[in-house]
Image (cartoon, helix red, strand yellow):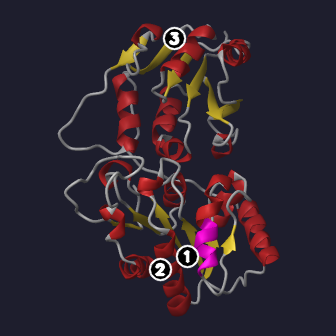
Amino acid sequence: MRTMKILIRVPNWIGDSVLAQPAIESVADSFPDAELWLSAAEWVKDLYPSKGAIAGVLPLSPPNGLKSVRAAARKIRAQSFDIGILFTNSFGSALLFFLAGIPQRWGYAADGRRLLLTRAVRSTDRDAPRHQVQYYLDLVTGLGLKSRPPGLLLTVPEEEKGRARRFLEDLGVDPRRSLLILSPGAGYGPAKRWPASRFAAVTSLFRERKDAAVLIIGSAAESDIADAISSSLKKKPYVLTGKTTLSQLKGLISLAHLFVSNDSGPMHLANALRVPVVGIFGPTDPAVTGPFEPPAAVVKKEVPCWPCSYRKCPYDHRCMMRIEPEEVYRAGEALWR
């Protein structure tokens, strides 16, 4: 008898991919005898090594016209999947599974794609905001499957940690010193970014009071923010924006004593690795996208225009400008391990 094959389309962003972890594990629990595959964007596929319940990962390139979508559909069709589950909400992701000929296509009825789905779950509006972890688990229960209790946990093998330690030694980082990692970017837009000058100020505080070695991480597109922080400091931090793979980043973060970040994907990665996290929040709601697991702290200000979820603040960015470096330092000091 042929083994059932299931393909899960995971979210495109690092943070969402981390937050979908309990929902993905719940699908695996619900179909213990099935062969479970994931389709993932190139930049998040390394979150999902092919082991355990995951039979394999199909990396997807960004769509570039109908020709590329058809090519991706042929690639998926060749695997003869029986069920496709969409943790993405886009019309395009549902169209891809439809063109790939997956007989059963399940997901939220979002973005006008209900007719492309064979089982569509309606996202219920609630008075109280729900965390993204629960949002993905609600899809699982809406599909009639049993969900795990919400919880995040990623682990890094000792071999990967060893490579991270050697990476730091090659940079010249003294392994006896405490390690502070900063993530000053935010792919969503500048409204979510605490100013570079404030990150520089909090860096100075941790150096003076904790003698911390400081790494700045992020994508290559965030190098200008890292450079702005570094240029204002006499003793330069180690700037790694655009210089690490996702696997390397996981290893480095696992060694940190503290991770200070805007509301971003790396913040959720650090939180799932159970590294102490200070999340700096401006226009977004930490009840929805905040760190989910302890140890973590959120620093935010109550302002009349919050939450706006703007990508770029049209006013004076007061939600971020009112957060002082000393506040962030105190939150971090309370979590320092």
The percent position of residue 201, horizontal first and vertical second, equals 49, 81
Q: Is residue 326 above or below residue 149?
A: below
Identify which residue is drawn at 48% across, 80% down: 202
Q: Nearer the viewer, residue 296 or 204?
A: 204
User: Which label number is shown at residue 257?
Assistant: 1
Mark found first going from the N terminus, 2 or 1? 1
Identify which residue is drawn at 79% across, 71% down: 166
Q: What secondary structure is marked by label 2?
A: loop
Mark found first going from the N terminus, 3 or 1? 3
Identify which residue is drawn at 37% across, 19% down: 109
Circle 3: residue type: Gln
Between the C-alphas of marks 3 and 1, the distance is 45 Å
Rendered image quadrant of residue 53: top right
Mark 2 touches mark 1? (CB < 8 Å) = yes
Circle 1: residue type: His
The residue singled out by tag 2 in the image is 336
Between the C-alphas of marks 2 and 3, the distance is 48 Å
Mark found first going from the N terminus, 2 or 3? 3
Main SS category, magenta section: helix
Q: Is residue 145 above or below residue 311?
A: above
Relative to 228, is 76 on the left or the right? right
Q: Residue furthest bottom?
A: 208
Rendered image quadrant of residue 4: top right
Q: Nearer the viewer, residue 148 or 134?
A: 134
* Range covered by the magenta-colored residues: 226-232
Q: What secondary structure is marked by label 3?
A: strand
Q: Residue furthest front?
A: 315
Rendered image quadrant of residue 192: bottom left
Q: Nearer the viewer, residue 27 or 272?
A: 272
The residue singled out by tag 3 in the image is 104
Circle 2: residue type: Trp
